[in-house]
Image (tube, helix red, strand yellow):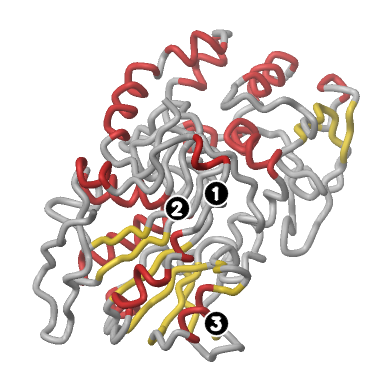
Amino acid sequence: MFSKFIVLLFSSFLVLTSFCHCTSQQTKNSVAVKSKEVTTTLPIAMGAEQINTYLHILEGKKIGLVVNNTSIVKGTHLLDTLLLSGVDVVKIFAPEHGFRGDTENGGHVNDQVDPATSLSIISLHGKNKKPTAEQIKGLDILVFDMQDVGVRFYTYYCTMFYVMQAAAENHVAVMILDRPNPNGHYIDGPILDTVTCRSFVGLLPIPIVHGLTLGEMAQMINDEGWLGKNKTCPLKVIPMLNYTHLTSYSLPILPSPNLPNDQSIQLYPSVCLFEGTKFSLGRGTPFPFQVVGYPDTIFGKFSFTPVSIPGKSNEPPLMNKKCYGIDLRTAQTNGFTLMYLLDMYRKDPNKATFFIPFFEKLIGNKTVRGMIERGDSEETIKASWQTELMAYKVMRKKYLLYTDFE
């Protein structure tokens, strides 16, 4: 069970003895599911659904919600669930894609007012990605509840990091309502070089496929000192029931406009690397992250034409140009691979224009591109990051809340 977290001195009215800071052993003791067999018979219960576990902590406090369209509790949005339970929600914070999840990738999210509740919605993907001291002034607890996909360049964990950092600096507590990781059954990819490649699509020294739920990652962020020197935030994670890292999970709600199905989510770690090239990965089509192509028949017989789709891809790469390449809609997905990227690079007669600078931010270091350009095999390239990856796996074990896949 969680031990009491030693809270920083708050103003006299703020009492948070229910919050706890999980050490490595305490994390292991908090595992809700201890056997593989349990997950085959019982449905997953989300952290947000454990309302009797956390409602008493929120009562009498001023709450800020960091939520989006995936923050659903048995068919009802978390905001409505908490308001109906008498919780004093005073502010909403919206990540990339917005509060309703209808803003395209990278699109500017504006501050607004929720018409249903008249609550202020503050964008964390507009002027600032980190809540300001003024924006969280007067709040007691920030509640974070969003569906992640378990990949380093998917930005919801970055939003969580900045929320935790702001909370640590302003003596506000954070509660994470945990949800499954649909790519949580494996770990792969290079560790991000935070000195040369840090950005909002790669913020922490973790691999491309990190194998953590956001609740587990929040504990890692806090305990590894990543919030800054001597900075931690009062943290409470509400874990799921009946979930393990072996559990297959199909997302019932789109996590973002361009991840429309399980296939796109499973291909995402591998195919998203094409965002760092001149190629299209299907934005502006009905099957984003499931096709790859360029306006040259040398790349394949399959063809598609990206077009503007308001709310999904207003001006997609290679818009209105017929692209030729590969169709991955029925491809077997066996984890993270460089196969598609290497294949297209080898076919390209104009290799000097293949990559754009964004590639280094996605892959996470300055060495992989050179290895590809040198003609190294996928096996050789993957071998280059194994030492760091093994060290990460050891660190990760300390923060697991659920039975692992190994």
Mark 3 vs 2, N-terminal side: 3
Q: Is residue 378 above or below residue 73?
A: above
Against 384, is 39 above or below?
below
Q: Are marks 3 and 2 in contact (CB under 8 Å)?
A: no
Please tell me in which quadrant of the rendered image residue 277 appears: top right
Residue 343: where, in percent of width, then height?
A: 70, 17
Is 380 above or below relative to 154?
above
Q: How far separated are the C-alphas under marks 2 and 1?
A: 9 Å
Residue corresponding to mark 3: 112
Foreground tag (2 vs 1): 1
Amino acid type of the residue that numbered disc 3 sits on in the rendered structure = Gln
Q: Residue at x 67, y 27 (%)?
A: 333
What is the number of the mark on residue 342?
Answer: none
**Is residue 317 left or right of 182 when viewed as pictured?**
right
Which of the two discs, 3 and 2, sits closer to the camera? Answer: 2
Helix, strand or loop at mark 1 = loop
Q: Is residue 204 above or below residue 187?
A: below
According to the picture, the residue beneath numbered tag 2 turns out to be 241
Which residue bears the numbered disc 1? 42
Q: Tell me how far mark 3 sits from mark 1, CA to CA.
A: 40 Å
Q: Is residue 339 left or right of residue 119?
A: right
Instruction: Name the residue type under label 1.
Output: Leu
Q: Earlier in the sequence, mark 3 or mark 1?
A: 1
Q: Residue at x 41, y 33 (%)?
A: 404
Label 1 environment density (alpha carbons within 10 Å; few <14, some 14–19, many ≥20):
few
Q: What separation in Å lies between label 3 and label 2 (alpha carbons)?
A: 35 Å
Q: Nearer the viewer, residue 313 or 223?
A: 223
Residues packed near mark 2 inside 10 Å, few (<14), some (14 to 19) or many (20 plus): many
